[in-house]
Image (cartoon, rainbow, N blue to C red):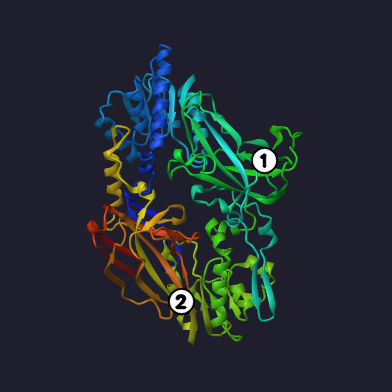
Amino acid sequence: MKTFCGRANPTTGAMEWVEEDENYDYHQEIARSRYADMLHDKDRNVKYYQGIRAAVCRVKERGEKAIVLDIGTGTGLLSMMAASAGADFCYAVEVFKPMANAAVKIVEKNGFRDKIKVINKHSTEITVGPDGDMRCRANILVTELFDTELIGEGALPTYEHAHKYLVQEGCEAVPHRATVYVQLVESKRMWSWNKLFPIHVEAEDGEKIIVSPSEMENCPGVPSVCDIQLNQMPSSDFTILSDVMTMFSVDFSRPVRSASTYYRVQLEPVKSGKAQIVLSWWDIDMDPSGTINCTMAPYWVKSTSAFQWRDHWMQCVYFLPNEEPVLQGEKVYLTACRDEYSLWYKLQKDSGAEENKADVRVESPVCRCQAHLLWNRPRFGELNDQHRTCQYIESLRKVLKTDSVCLCISDGSLLPVLAHYLGAKQVQYFFLVFKANHLEDKIKIIEARPELLTSSHLEDKKISVLVGEPFFTTSLLPWHNLYFWYARTAVTSHLSSNITVLPQSASLHMMIVEFQDLWRIRSPCGTCEGFDVQTMDDMIKNSLNFRESREAEPHPLWEYPCKSLSDPQEVLTFDFRKTVPQHGLGTEGSVSLLRKGKSHGAVLWMEYHLTADISLSTGLTQISNEKGNCEWNPHCKQAVYFFSSVIESETLSDLPSAVTYAINFNTKTGEIAMDFKL
């Protein structure tokens, strides 16, 4: 049997259905899962263990048998904690079959076969009774169903069902409650991920300003949360406008309602400014008294001594529908609306107290401008990056002439508008911005794929300047934007003999790094709180090696500090002035290790050479000190290739002198295969 998977094809720029082995989906799910990250989360594991021990103890003190229901058991860890804490029996529910199989093995290996029953079902399909999946209802409910937004993985409907059908009234719950916190801030950086700022262009006939259309300006955007590692956001990048407020709590020991609702709090701004962003996080109390607490609070709210790095739970950035001016001391009302799976916020000057809660319509925001559907948050940030835009303007000035016939190949790009203002005739597609700037008749939109371009599209003119950022929405890894090269090859017959291509070339760069924390997501765990979870390690390793060659994976490294152990090295070049060659491009070599540390992996990124002397990096922007701390382009994801074994060198003398590599670009598929040896 085969399975079909959606995958971006870098040679066509399209999403395509690729036939894969039937186990491919499983292996991808396991290889890219966050199980390792959760097992390495010491703070989470210790608090869960303490909470479970206390809950079992409270039930036993009442003279009852402790029957545990563990929903979303994963490795079976929480059920094993309950069994070792004295629970009489545990029902461990896991819907993902390979994971349920692993849980059975892990439970057996740790000697809990008689105490834990693993059920491979969705919790809503479980039956209770003498012949059911569970003999009786449980009196302790243990779950870990939370994501960064708390409710995004369906925790509320799962709890709602469990209370109705699977647990006793007045049961113990671990965690006992969750509380969501909010803080109002002003942040030009974060707001730039949601709105398009005006762009100033110095043209021959004076200054021109590219503005976003009113539909985009007034668009509420999309309700999907922006989850990031807020601990990597410097305090200079935002201004706090309010104290931290409790938005709402959920008591998991009582029946839970998942129906849409809203919560409202009164805020008194501690500073005047523009309210643009709601920062949010949650904590969980593992016990009724709240003495066992696990919090996601960012660095400015809690002391760093209590800091636990984790990637499975981060912090949330919510964009208000519009920025609202607030005055210090002048009360405002913040409303959080939610459905079963997501939250969104709005700010009002009055309380709306006369509203009857039942009458308030909790409607999820809908993007009306299309831009929030076309551009993700980092893309908005990239388009708003003034320094980057200036580099394109400077490059275009060098190559454009008054008679230039210009074709732009990039998704949702502002390059056509820049090229027009800088004196060219021009073609490209992103209609919204053209209309707002009254350029519909100046910029022609060609609605055809590059290989289907005809002379009539171009009014029988030859293209003299071909431009691209390049940026394509289907790109996942840095080299996927090389689709520009394939598109350039497809339109060759329409190019003039003295064609100028911008960027003229690209290069792939690589560097060996030591991660401060990101290594944990791919690192074997061995034992977790005294339980042997080696089976899980083997399963992840097996899935990572499912393909003949391990693959690089995309990560936004501005969120994940690392230090360089080698100099950055250029490994491949791609000349856009020529067509894509028939043969592949390959390179072998070695990179010297210059600093002591753990070689966790290689980071790869692209640099685009717009002209002979202007280049843009999608990866490393600088190594900021002698320790090797790196700064990364914040708008792009870099490719990370984790080494299967980590070499640690305490001194320079025991450094392996180099890492050898082989990197091959397959021009037929547009993919890059790589191999590293320490």
Up-down: is 213 above or below 131? below
Q: Is residue 398 left or right of residue 104?
A: right
Camera-side residue of 526 and 516: 516
Q: Which residue is located at x 28 percent, y 48 percent? A: 541
Q: Amino acid at mark 2?
A: Arg
- In the rendered image, the residue lying farthest to the bottom is 497
User: How many other residues sit within 10 Å of disc 1, few (<14), some (14-19) or many (≥20)?
Assistant: many
Q: Which residue is mark 2?
A: 488
- What's the amino acid at mark 1? Leu
Q: Which image quarter is the C terminus in?
A: bottom left
Compared with 176, 652 (above or below) is below
Q: In the visual, does 628 lie left or right of 374?
A: left
The Cα atoms of the two marked residues, 2 and 1, are separated by 50 Å
Question: Looking at the rendering, which quadrant does residue 195 occupy?
Answer: bottom right
First in sequence, mark 2 or 1: give its number: 1
Please name the residue that numbered disc 1 is placed on: 334
Residue situated in front as seen by the camera: 660 or 64 = 660
**Image point 56% across, 42% down: which residue?**
280
Residue 166 in the image: x percent, y percent?
45, 24
- In the rendered image, residue 268, in percent from the top left (x then y), is placed at 69, 39
Residue at 52% from the left image edge and 33% from the top image edge? 157
561 and 279: which is toward the camera: 561
Q: Residues within 10 Å of mark 2 (few under 14, many from 20)?
A: many
- Is residue 287 shown above or below 14? above
Q: Which mark is residue 135?
A: none
**Which secondary structure lies at badge 1?**
strand
> Dot 2 lies on which element?
helix
Q: How many marks?
A: 2
Res 208 seen here: yes
Picture layout, residue 188 above or below residue 119:
below
